[in-house]
Amino acid sequence: MAKKLGPPIFLGVFTVLALIFLTGGGNDDKDEMRQALQVEAVYYDSGHVEISYLDSLGQTDQAVLEILGMDDSFQKTFQGSEFIEIVPFPNVPKYGWAIHPIVIEVDHEEFGHVQLKTEIHAVGEPIPNTIYAKP
């Protein structure tokens, strides 16, 4: 009987990509981006994830939210410097939340094109780190 290798392979590839983002070329803007651009994704036992984005500088022209690893891809575009999106998730994933990273592509007046990546966490758990990258 063949085992499904998709989720473990995806998790491995994702880990490598995350390391590349973390160790990528140093950028002086990263500290400023961490201060100005905040994202959080919280899972509630009622079966949904609340994803919030805030640009404290108010300079986001457009943000594209994507949740990776879902059977049906989730993507939505927002105008402006903040949003909250509620996404149904009836079950906690078998392999953990790392297989459903949250990626936000931002067009920002000061920082240019920026990618933010974080993970979903349950209420009461620590907020995972956010990775900031300029492709």
Image (cartoon, rainbow, N blue to C red):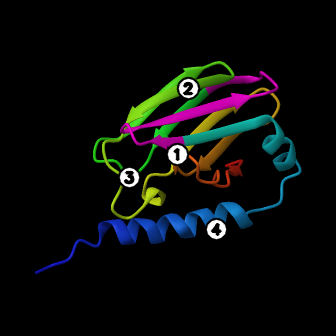
Q: Secondary structure at mark 4?
A: helix
Label 3 crowding class (10 Å Cα cut-off): few <14, some 14-19, many 20+? Answer: some
The x, y position of residue 79, in whole percent, is 60, 18
Q: Amino acid at mark 2?
A: Ile
Q: Quadrant of the N terminus?
A: bottom left
Three-letter amino acid code at disc 4? Leu
Tell whether position 111 is magenta: no
Spatial distance from mark 2 to mark 4, Cα to Cα?
28 Å
Secondary structure of the residue carrying numbered label 2: strand
The residue that label 2 is drawn on is 84
Residue type, numbered disc 1: Ile
- Horizontal side, residue 29 vs residue 38: left or right: right
- Residue 69: give its label: 3
Q: CA distance from mark 1 to mark 2?
A: 13 Å
Q: Position of residue 38 (x, y in %)?
A: 71, 38
Extent of the magenta region: 42-62
**If you read the primary sequence from the N terminus, does the residue marked by circle 3 or circle 4 appear first?**
4
